[in-house]
Structures are given as structure tokens and as C-alpha cells.
Image (spheres, rainbow, N blue to C red):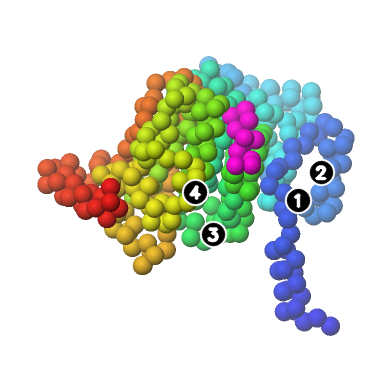
Amino acid sequence: MKNISQELKESLDERASAAIDSKPTVFDFKKSEDQNAANDLFNLRRIQYVADDYKEQQNELFAVKNPSMVYAPDFKKKFEDYYSALDKECPIWQSGHWVYFPWLSKLTHILEEDDFQMVRTARNKNLINKEEQEKFYNAIVGIGGLSVGNSVALAIVLQGGAKRIKLADLDRLALSNTNRIRTGVDNLGVLKVEMTARQIYEINPYAEVELFPEGLTKENIGKFFEGLDIVIDELDNLAVKYLIREQAKKHKIAVVMAADNGDNAVVDIERYDLDPNTPFFQGRMGEVSYEMLSKLDKFGIGRMITKHVGPENVTERMQQSLLEMGKTIVSWPQLGGAALVNGSAVAYCVRKILCGQPLENNRALISLDEKLVPNYNSLEEVEKRGKIAENFKKIFNL
């Protein structure tokens, strides 16, 4: 007979290797086939939890559609009458949709898509108006790289943007990623594209997320760009960054990229939608090619990144850290706060571009240090940073 340890080890191995779908199933319980499918999931014990807050969602929907009634003393009665009429028209448990999240073993009752989107974005009004919200939601957005890119995706979707998103990244979530990616240890070892897709679906179950778990390559980048309205570049590979700009120029769409810089962000905007002849990387790397960038060693990559960001823009502690890579530091240092700042900034740029609104057409430095550190712009501090930057330039022969 097996002992408890053997049984437990076998159970752990079996569950750890089990594949879990990263796309939810949306059920319409007015359809008998959907009722049968959900019932099968219950019988197989795939559904362990049920969330049904449908009445409150209808309450919010009623308020959004009737804002003049909200503060009236009889609002509650009017809603109860409305809700009773809904139940007579169609039993409440069959109304709206039920969403099964396989990775959560959970079934959740939500409004139908148009009503769902109306309520979910109601508090955006009129910071984002109706026309802008529709443009933002109906756009197809591509995101390459899901470290900062994870924050970008969630910031876009939180604001009611981009029902259709393409995600590209070949890495799995590692423990060292969790200092900057908004997730938990329950996702360790999960592909970043799947982890991010699940987070998107949990915010908007009606989203359509296409995954590129092999990352972006010469072979698949054409497919990735099909139908895109804008692309976000958060990849580490400089050669693939070059391929992104080739495709962006070909398809005449904008590229937005943000880089961590200590607690701060460097946001770059390349408007190939307005001018297809915009220099790649705004010319900051000089004359480069895919072949040249693909052959760089680690020092060459560091030098090129420093050249692009600009030594004068790299914070003092970032400079000190970069010089310790391979000595006392394993990799490029990044902070969770900076990832969130970058995510918000890129989502802002994406919305402005998609809605045809004025936006910086090159680079923006978003510096918490400048705004919050005392005497940051004093002559003494400016001169000190200048000297540090000059020394840093010499190290990389810039």
C-alpha cells in the first residue's frame, strides 16, 4: 500500500503538470446547451465557487440609465419595480451571462456586454466621453513584453480600453519578477502571456486576447501586426525592437515605449501613423540594423540602451547599479512603482493617440524625483548630476 507521503507526492506532481485553460467560457442560461455544459462542470467539480451580485449590477445599470432619479427619495422603490419586471420577463438566474473562469474554478453572473461596459465605464464620464470610450474600446492593441507591459495592459483595460489585445512574451513568471508585476506567487511558472490574459479576462470577460507565447520573431511578427491600431514595445531584445518599427512603419501605426529609470519613467513615442519616415528610435541610436543589433554582446546592449535613454537621463542609483551588473547584481534593476508609473503613462498615450488628441511626439520624462525630492533642480544638484553623467558616458565611450 502507498503511504501518505507517496500519495501526496503523486497528487502534487499530477496537479502541477495539469494544463488549465486561460480563457473563460461565457454561458447564456436561456440556452439549454449552455445549461447542460455548466451542469457538467458542476458534476465534474470543476466549479467550486459561484459569485452572483447580479442584482447590484442591475441596480447600478438602472442608476446609470436614469441619473436624474438617483437622488430622488423613491429611487429604491422604482428600482425594485424595475427588477421585478425583469424577473417576470425572464427569470433572473437566466438573465445576463454567467462566466466560468477555469483557473479560478469559479462561475460569475454578469450583465450582457453592452450593459456591462456601460456600468464598468460609468465612472469614467466625462473624463473620457462616450465617443472617446468607444474608440478606445474598439481599438486593437498589441503589447510586446509583459514586465512593464503587464502594467500597461491592465491600465488600458481598467480604463475600459481595447476589447481586443494581442500579447507577446516567451517568458514564464519567476519569483524575481514579482517585485514589479502585479500578480501573486500562485502564478509562478505560468507563461506571462497567459497570466496577463487571465488578469484581463477577470476585468473584462468579454475581451478577446490573442497570445503569442513564443514571443515576437521574424516568422510571426507579420501576423502579430495584422489589424493592429497601435503597438506597445516593452521588449528587452533590441533586434526585435527594430523589427517592431519596421512593421509599424509598414502599417503606419504608432509605437509607444516606456523604460524604467529608478523610480521614474522615460516614455518614447514614435508616430509612424503621422509620418512613416520617422527615424527608428527617433534617431537616438544612430544608424542601426536588425543584423547589427542582433550581434551585440551584453556590454554592447548596455551601451546602446544607455545611448538611447541618454546618460544625462539615467538616475544616479541606476547608473551605479548598471555598473554592478555581473558583479554584485544579476540583472537590470527595476521597481514595481516605476512599472506602475510606466503603465499609466503608456495607457494615457495610447488613449490620446487612438482618440486623435494632441500628444508629445517624441519623448517625455516622468520624474517623481524631480517633483518630490527637495532641491532637485538646485544649481548644486544639477551640476552634480551633470558630472556623474559625464563619467558614465566615458565608461560606455559615448
Q: Residues within 10 Å of mark 3 (few under 14, many from 20)?
A: some
Q: Residues within 10 Å of mark 4 (few under 14, many from 20)?
A: some
Image depth: mark 3 or mark 1 in front: 3
Q: Residues within 10 Å of mark 1 (few under 14, many from 20)?
A: some
Q: Amino acid at mark 2?
A: Ala
Q: Say which residue label 3 marks.
A: 174
Judging from the image, what secondary structure is the residue with disc 1 in? loop
Is residue 110 positioned above or below 44 on the image? above
Can residue 335 be seen in this snapshot? Answer: no
Q: Position of residue 315 (x, y in %)?
A: 28, 49
Image depth: mark 3 or mark 2 in front: 3
Q: Splitting the image into 4 quarters, where does residue 14 fall? A: bottom right
Q: Position of residue 168 (x, y in %)?
A: 59, 43
Q: Amino acid at mark 1?
A: Ile
Q: Amino acid at mark 4?
A: Ser
Image depth: mark 4 or mark 2 in front: 4
Q: CA distance from mark 4 to mark 2?
A: 49 Å
Q: Is residue 307 left or right of residue 36?
A: left
Q: Earlier in the sequence, mark 3 or mark 2?
A: 2
Q: Say which residue label 4 marks.
A: 294
Q: What is the count of numbered marks?
A: 4
Q: Say which residue label 1 marks.
A: 47
Q: Say which residue label 2 marks.
A: 38
What residue is drawn where x is 57% and y is 22%? 134
- Is residue 154 or residue 243 the one in the foreground? 243
Q: CA distance from mark 1 to mark 2?
A: 9 Å
Would you say the residues marked 1 and 2 are in contact, meaning their CB atoms lie under 8 Å apart? yes
Judging from the image, what secondary structure is the residue with disc 3 in? loop
Q: Earlier in the sequence, mark 3 or mark 4?
A: 3
Q: Give the position of the N terminus as an image quadrant.
A: bottom right
Q: Residues within 10 Å of mark 2 (few under 14, many from 20)?
A: many
Q: Is residue 258 left or right of residue 49?
A: left
